[in-house]
Every structure is written in structure tokens, then in C-alpha cells.
Image: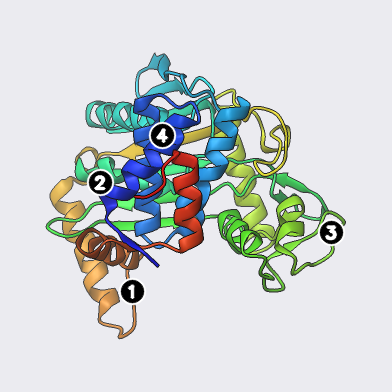
Amino acid sequence: MPQLSIVQLVELTARALKRAGASRAMAQAAAQALVVAEAEGLSGHGLSRVALYCRHLREGRALGKAKPKVVRRKGATALVDAGGGLAFLACAMAVKEAIARAKRYGVSFVGITNSHHMGALAYHLAPVAQAGVVGLAFSTSPSAINAWGGKHAFYGTNPIAAVFPRSGAEPVVVDLSLTEVTRGKIMVYAKEDKPIPVGWAVDNDGSPTTDAKAALTGSLNAIGGVKGAALALMVEVLCVALTGAAFSFENDSYFEPGNKPRIGHAILAIDPAALAGSDAYFSRLEIMINTMLRDEGVRLPGARRQKLTAAAHTNGLQIADAQIAELLALAGKKSV
């Protein structure tokens, strides 16, 4: 397997996306996010998504020339319209709005409508943590989870993420899908023609399956059963009812021919200075973390991905031959 630098992979990925119809800015923003996800060990949200994004750009399911814009502002809230393009420029715009409004009002809520796949959510919250602000992100997706008691996919995987900045240390990062496993991971299994473990998903008839391809057109099991399904409902309301986006059941699967996604996302930001104060926040957080780490074996959320990212920036990433071949073909190149 070849070893490529982060810079090489971003350049190759951006070239593939531009060739499929993305603007320079959209391609660069998406490429950066996908390669960072790969570096963090999140392959389901990494380079495995490039071919899908390219297909959506070519088919018009994602508009490559779209320019996101803020369409509404009121106090601590704002709404960004992604214009039907890939999500990353719109998310960056929303995060900038969220930080500014949290600094002014103490808290902010920024919705994103008419968007596409958001990728790894915590990636978008890095600037929030750098600003010393607590951040939460939510997103929907095409239907993937059955409503509790139902047999068919209804809610999206509806991931949630949070970042908690620390003083002089990497932030605590929480990033999870509301399914037993991410759809992106099942997509990797399907691509490699590998069976998935029992308990991850059911097929289109509601029967448990180990067939990854059947899982992608069926329903994924919610994390924690009824509790996970309830959380998925909450995310659906936050990201769709408040933003005017399409509900998960109104969006066709990314992996089959279908309509243009109108995905909804939401960013919530909280300035610690507005409550007990930044000093109190950082002090109390460190007390919690230091107490946790006294228990041997405890690992902070986000620590593994931060370690992998640091190593990737130093050593590059080993990419499977088949993945490199696919990227080269999409980018119209014969070699890296």
C-alpha cells in the first residue's frame, strides 16, 4: 500500500471533486474534511465517500457551483442555506456565525438547510473549541433507523457531536451516530463484500441481516433501542422542523438513484464566560478529567483520533491500492 502525505491526498481528492463539477472552494473544503476523517481513522467518512460525492455532483444531486448564504438572522440565531451543494462551505459559514453570536449573546443556534452529507460532525466544531467555546452539532440523513416498533427506515442516522475546549490541552471530542454502527462503516463493508455482524441492521423486510448491501437499503438498529430512537426524533426536529429542510423519510438513499438531498444540520455554541465564567469552566473540567484518568484504562473521547491525526501529519497515510486507483481515475491522473 502506498504512503501518501495529507497534502497529496487533499490535492488528489480536490482534483477529483472539481473534475466532477465542484467549484474550487467547494472541492477544497470537502477534500480537507474527507482527508481529515481518513487521518482520524474514520474511513466511513473519509476517502470512501469521494466516489459517492463525485457521482452526486455529476448527477446533479449535489450542485457544484452552489454558494451558501445566510438567509435569516435574529438575535442569537441564524439560518444558512447551503444552496443544494456539498455541505462543507455552508457548515464553515454556520460555525463562524455561531461563534460570533455566542460571544455576543452567550449562546447561539445556527441552522443549515438545503444541504448534503455533513461528514464527520466533530470536524466542523474544531474552530468552536479554538475560540474557547463549547460546541454541539446535529445532522440528519436519508432514512436509516426505524421508528420504535416499526419495521422500515424512518429517521436518519442523525449523528450528534460535541467539543469541550480545555486550557493548554486538546479538547474533549464526542462524535457518535445514533445507530449501533455508522452507515459509512457498513458502506465500507459493502464495498469490500464483507458480512456485517448480527445486530447492526435489518433488511427491507425488517429481518436481521449480515448482508451489508441489504443493510444499506434496509434499516440500521438504533443505539440503545427505544432511547436511541427517541434521540433520533429529537435531532430530526432540531435539524428539520426548525430549518425547513427535508425530513429523513423525504430524502432518498445516497446509495441508490434518487432525489436531490435537502439535509438539515444545526450548530449550538455556548460561551463559558456567560455562565460561571471561563476560569471556572476550565478549572472544573480539568478536575473531572483528572479524576477520570486516575482509573487505569480510561480514555478521553477524541483522544484516539487526535493521536492518529498527529501521526498522519508526520508519517502520511497508508492507502489501499484499490482506493488509490479509484481516486486517480476520478481525478483523471495516472499517478500521484
Crowding near pointer 3: few (<14 within 10 Å), some, many (20+)? Answer: some
Give the CA distance from mark 2 to mark 3.
41 Å
The earlier-in-sequence mark between 4 and 2 is: 4
Disc number lying in front (4 or 2)? 4
Where residue 172 appears, as percent x and y from the top left, is 30, 59
- Helix, strand or loop under label 3: loop
As drawn, the label of residue 299 is 1
The earlier-in-sequence mark between 1 and 4 is: 4
The residue labelled by disc 2 is 129
- Residue pictured at 33% horizontal, 33% vertical: 95
Give the CA distance from mark 1 to mark 4.
29 Å
Where residue 239 appears, as percent x and y from the top left, is 55, 34
- Residue pictured at 51% horizontal, 50% vertical: 326
The residue labelled by disc 3 is 206
Say left or right for 190 vs 320: right
Where residue 6 appears, as percent x and y from the top left, is 28, 52
* Residue 65, placed above or below residue 297: above
Say left or right for 269 vs 45: left
- Residue pictured at 36% horizontal, 59% vertical: 40
Give the CA distance from mark 1 to mark 3.
36 Å
Kind of residue at disc 1: Arg
